[in-house]
Structures are given as C-alpha cells and as structure tokens.
Amino acid sequence: MKLAVIILAAGQGKRMKSALPKVLQPLAGQPLLGHVLTVADALRPQSIHVVYGHGGDDVRATFAGARVHWALQAEQHGTGHALMQAMPAVGDDQVVLVLYGDVPLVRLDTLRELLAHANAKTLSLLTVILDDPTGYGRIVRAASGAIERIVEQQDASAAELAIREGNSGILAAPAKLLRQWLGQLKNANAQGEYYLTDVIAMAVRDQVQVVPCIAPTEAEVLGVNDKAQLAQLERLYQRRRVNELLVAGATLIDPARLDVRGEVTVGRDVVIEANVLLEGQVFLGDRVRVGPNCVLRDMRVGADTVIHPNCVLERSDIDEACSVGPFARLRPGSVLRRDSHIGNFVELKKTTLGEGSKAN
C-alpha cells in the first residue's frame, strides 16, 4: 500500500519556558522536527503531512522548502483530534504512519520493521519496555499476549500502572479504517481530550489484528517536554553518532567530548582529540588528525593532514599532507593545496594556497 506519514507537531511546549515553539528547539544544531522529517523522508512516502499549531508561522517558515503538506490544529484537543486535521488529505488506499515532532531519535530500521506489519487489515504499534513507565500510556494485553487496549496513566488502575510496557504513540494503520475510528472517538476521560490511543481498542473490537513491535531501545521513543529532557536527548544523540564513528574506525581520544552536528565521513586511522565540534558535511581522509578545541564546519580534509589545536575551519577544502594551525582560521572559500602549511593565528578567506606553500 502507499504510505502517508503524518507528524503531530502542534504542541505549545510550555515547560520549555521558551519563545521558540517546541518542535523548533535545537538538537545537535537542527530543529527537533527536522530530525523527524529526515527519517520520514527516508521512508520514501507518497506524502508527508505536518500538523502544526503553536508558533505555526515560525514552524512553516523554518521548513518552507520541505516537501510537506501542512494541516492546522487551531485548538489542541488531544492526539486523536490532531490526527483528524490531516486525514482529509490522505487517501483510503494509503497506510498512515503517525510520528511526533518532539520524538526525534526513532531509527529508520525501526520504522521499516513497523511498516512491514501494516496493511489494509492490520494495525502495527510501536511499544517500549520501560524501567520507569511514568507518563506513558500502558499496553494492556490479554492472557494470550494479544494487545487489548492502551490506558493513559491518568486513567489507569493500580494494576495497570504496574505495567512496564508503554505506548510510544507511533503506529501505522490503514487510512480507511483509521478514518472510521477517529470519527468514533469520545473525550470522556480525565483530560477531556480525544485520545488516539483509543483506536487500539476499536481495532480489537473490529477484529483488526494489532501487531506490536517493541522498540530496541527506550531512547528511540523518548519525547521532549522541557530543557532537561532536551539535554538528555542531546547526550543520547551524541553517543549514537560517536558510536558510528568508532565503528567506522576513528580513534576518539575522549568520546564524551566530541559534538557531531551533521554528517561526518572518516577514512582509516583518523584521530580526533577532545572538545571538537564537527558541523554540517565533514569529510576526514585517511590518517587525518584533529587537535583539541577545533571547529570544522562543512569541510573536506585530505589524507595525512594535521589540524593543530584551537582552529576554526569552515566551508573550505584542504588537500593531502597539509598542516593547519594552531589557532588558525579558514573562512569560507579557502583552498589549501597538497603539502601546504598555515601557522599560528593565520586567517584566510577565499584564498588558494598553492602546493607546498607556507603562510605564517
């Protein structure tokens, strides 16, 4: 079936205590919603829909170039109500994948696994096993293990609160049935809202199979409600990116003190010292060494080059076997040809330094 992705991104985020809408809060230099759009686009859906609300003009302006259909949720009455706003633009022949603008770390492989079980007669639901399920809707299963329903924490009994399997909110369902279920939602609950989670019980009632997929890690489904949680996600994201570099063969002198805010490609035997920021598109060739306290932004660095401590390099091109710094600055448009050297406190802008040349 054709895929439509709907991202719910209308929340105000009062606990952020920020004038910036919650989904525009930065994670690794990119808005939260940007991370979700990236993984959604990688699924190659027929359409992507974003339900927006608070700070809507800013949200739309930030992603003005995105291949997105926008749906306004003028008043917030729950997740079910939010999804209703996008459904008129979705065809009955599509499977709908529901994502959240403040849940940025879900992996592409996890979503592909979820979608593998979704079809015209099946709803697939992403769940997670939690050490502390506080705040999550609980997954209520029958004795057979089949999912019966989801109960929100504020509506749960003491026995249900003890359940450790939580609802991530992420699901995939056939649009035709989802539209019917959304039309049947009631707001008779503690919050007076239309819960998307209620469609699970409706699917069970209608004998539609509900297939659970358990997320590999809790990190993938963590949301953001305040700056403390945002900082926690930043560390989890950085740990993920650092592990990718280590697996690729890079030597990181202190993995906890590397920040990655873009796409980084490394060759063999690359060494990166502590307190380094890599931003944008960065390529480090074989045996490159990056000293401590450096910033590299949209850089290509050729093999056997040494970046000495405390350099700021942006949107420039460095060939093989060069030496840069310490305390050097390359501003956009600079090119260092093979075996060239720039020394202490040298700054270049839109300058090409020829092969074997030196600037001190």
Image (tube, helix red, strand yellow):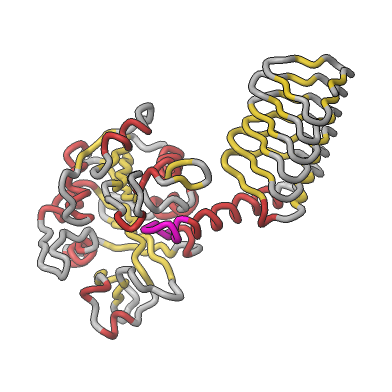
* Left/right of residue 346 with respect to residue 203 in the rendered view: right
Question: Magenta residues, as a range?
Answer: 221-230
Rendered position, 18 above or below 15: above
Q: Nearer the viewer, residue 341 or 345?
A: 345
Residue extending furthest toward the bottom: 159
* Residue 292 seen by the camera: yes
* Residue 51 seen by the camera: no
* Left/right of residue 36 with respect to residue 265 in the rendered view: left
Q: Position of residue 14 (x, y in %)?
A: 29, 55
Rendered position, 24 above or below 221: above
Q: Residue at x 66, y 57 (%)?
A: 256
Q: Nearer the viewer, residue 259 or 175?
A: 259
In reply to whether residue 345 is colored magenta, the answer given is no
- Within the image, what quadrant is residue 222 found in? bottom left
Rendered position, 193 above or below 244: below
Q: Residue at x 84, y 30 (%)?
A: 323
Residue extending furthest toward the front: 345
Q: Position of residue 241 (x, y in %)?
A: 61, 50
Q: Residue at x 53, y 46 (%)?
A: 28
- Within the image, what quadrant is residue 40 found in? top left
In reply to whether residue 227 is colored magenta, the answer given is yes
Where, quadrant-wise, is the C terminus in this rendering?
top right
* Left/right of residue 265 with respect to residue 357 in the rendered view: left
Q: Position of residue 55 (x, y in %)?
A: 27, 41
Q: Position of residue 159 (x, y in %)?
A: 29, 85
Mark count: 0
Where, quadrant-wise, is the N terminus in this rendering?
top left
Q: Residue at x 39, y 57 (%)?
A: 224
